[in-house]
Image (cartoon, rainbow, N blue to C red):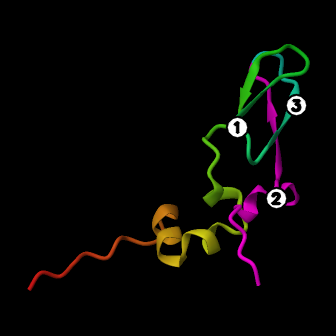
Amino acid sequence: MTMSTRCPGQDIRNLRVGLYKCPNCSNEVEIFSDEVSVRCPKCGEKVYSGKVASCIDWCAHARECLGEERWKLLRGEDKPQKEIKK
């Protein structure tokens, strides 16, 4: 079995789309999960998805790529283990 050096989340089959309203003209604009912003096709205003895209939020393979402990830590589900000093 060969190991891929490419993130499986970069496969366009894993992308999701969200609908956002343009702040200028209220036109509905599609923004894909790998995008932070797009231009409104109606008025040209920049429309933002509201947050910086992170593979942790949208990629089904993020847990596998990062490893369980780091994935939980970055999602805020787990506190880092403190070292016990002897």
Tell me how far mark 2 sits from mark 3, CA to CA: 25 Å
What label sits on residue 70 in the rendered view?
A: none
What label sits on residue 28 in the rendered view?
A: 3
Residue at the (50%, 71%) spot, across then down? 72
Three-letter code for the amino acid on which mark 1 is drawn:
Ser
Q: Earlier in the sequence, mark 3 or mark 1?
A: 3
Q: State the residue position of label 1.
A: 49
Q: Left or right of 29: which side holds 35?
A: left
Three-letter code for the amino acid on which mark 2 is drawn:
Asp
Return the x and y of residue 36 as percentages of the image width and height.
Answer: 69, 37
Q: Nearer the viewer, residue 13 or 40?
A: 13
Q: Is residue 43 magenta?
A: no
The quarter in which the C terminus is drawn is bottom left
Which element carries disc 2, helix, strand or loop? loop
Which element carries disc 3, helix, strand or loop? strand
Q: Left or right of 49: which side holds 73?
A: left
Return the x and y of residue 51 as percentages of the image width and height.
Answer: 61, 41
Q: Nearer the viewer, mark 2 or mark 3?
A: 2
Residue at the (60%, 41%) spot, across then down? 52
Q: Left or right of 60: which side holds 62?
A: left
Residue at the (70%, 62%) spot, across then down? 7
In magenta, the rendered stretch is 1-23
